[in-house]
Image (cartoon, rainbow, N blue to C red):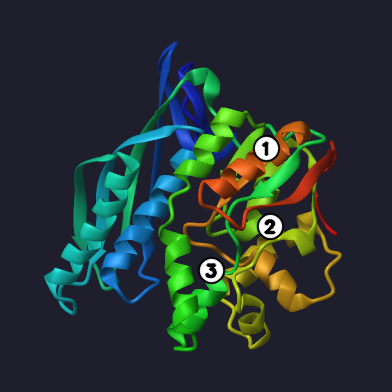
Amino acid sequence: MPHQNNPNLIVGFDPIDDAGVFKLNNKLAIVQTVDYITAIVDDPYTFGMIAAANSLSDIYSMGSKPITAMNIIAFPSDTLDISIMTQVLKGSLIKLNEAGVTLVGGHSVKNTELKYGLCVTGIVHPDMVITKSNAKIGDKIILTKPLGIGIITTALKAGMLKEETKTKLSEQMVRLNEKAAQAMVDTGVSACTDITGFGLLGHTCEMAENSRVTIEIFVDKVPFINEALEFARMGLVPEGMYANQEFRGNMVKDGVEDEDLLSLLYDPQTSGGLLISVPAEKADLLLSTIRKSGDGEAAIIGRVVNMSDSQIILL
């Protein structure tokens, strides 16, 4: 597509980031994103909460505050009762209220499959925008939530999850990235993105590519949801994992001999955590603050090592 030129466009297509940013004046810019997903849990109320948290995440990763949202829902009215749509929207509204976001409208279409998400607008000072394009040599890399959501939800569909794992899965996906993002803004960081459909390695590749750096990942430091590796060894891996590996594998210098463990690093996430590149001297303080704010499994998982051909090295 041809690109439009506007001097007030701070973040757009070149390079693509988690959300678009448009400057209104010298003190205010709006941040805009849209995202929707298919139902990955059976309970429609929980699905609404997950979809809302997922849609808000791009706003948080840019260091901005979400203020308004609009519903986007595709609904199979021939096969599902309208009460299910009501529960989805009620679940979403709970998370919007928690985030202090005002729902201003939306749009629905009839479809063969349930899909739901939000178009979200946030605000930020033009000089305070955080992108995935500014990781610096010497930075440490923090991941705020454990991986394995794609694999765990695949096991859920197969009816193989323990109740305690179901509970942990839902709790993680409905948890907003708001507090981690606020800690990031307060501390001052170099770059950030959120981990969603491209998996940890896919999104780390984006950060390395946009920042033109090489990032090392300490695989033994990466947090995973309990049972995720066990299910991966059973072959319960979503198709998106293979697509991620095919798309980004050429950028990854693979030092991992365990293919099942590697699949977790490519596993597509829904409402995943933030991936933050932070100056080394601030990393421990930021990690401690994030853990205290609710993301108890957050960890330093890597570092930015040099300017190069934008590679990811697995150690």
User: Do labels 3 and 2 touch, CB within 8 Å?
Assistant: no
User: Do labels 3 and 1 touch, CB within 8 Å?
Assistant: no
Mark 2–mark 1 distance (CA, rounded to whole Å): 25 Å
Q: Position of residue 269 (x, y in %)?
A: 53, 62
Q: Which residue is mark 2?
A: 201
Q: Along the polypeptide, which appears first: circle 3 or circle 2? A: 3
Q: Which residue is mark 3?
A: 149
Name the residue at the top extreme.
26
At label 3, the amino acid type is Ile
Q: Which residue is mark 1?
A: 285
At label 1, the amino acid type is Leu
Label 1 sits on a secondary structure element that is: helix
Give the residue drawn at x 27%, y 70%.
44
Q: Is residue 130 visible?
A: no
Q: Along the polypeptide, which appears first: circle 3 or circle 1? A: 3
Q: Position of residue 110 (x, y in %)?
A: 19, 65
Give the residue drawn at x 58%, y 55%.
296
Left or right of 3? Residue 88 is left
User: Do labels 2 and 1 touch, CB within 8 Å?
Assistant: no
Q: Position of residue 130 (x, y in %)?
A: 57, 31
Left or right of 145? Residue 259 is right
Mark 3–mark 2 distance (CA, rounded to whole Å): 14 Å
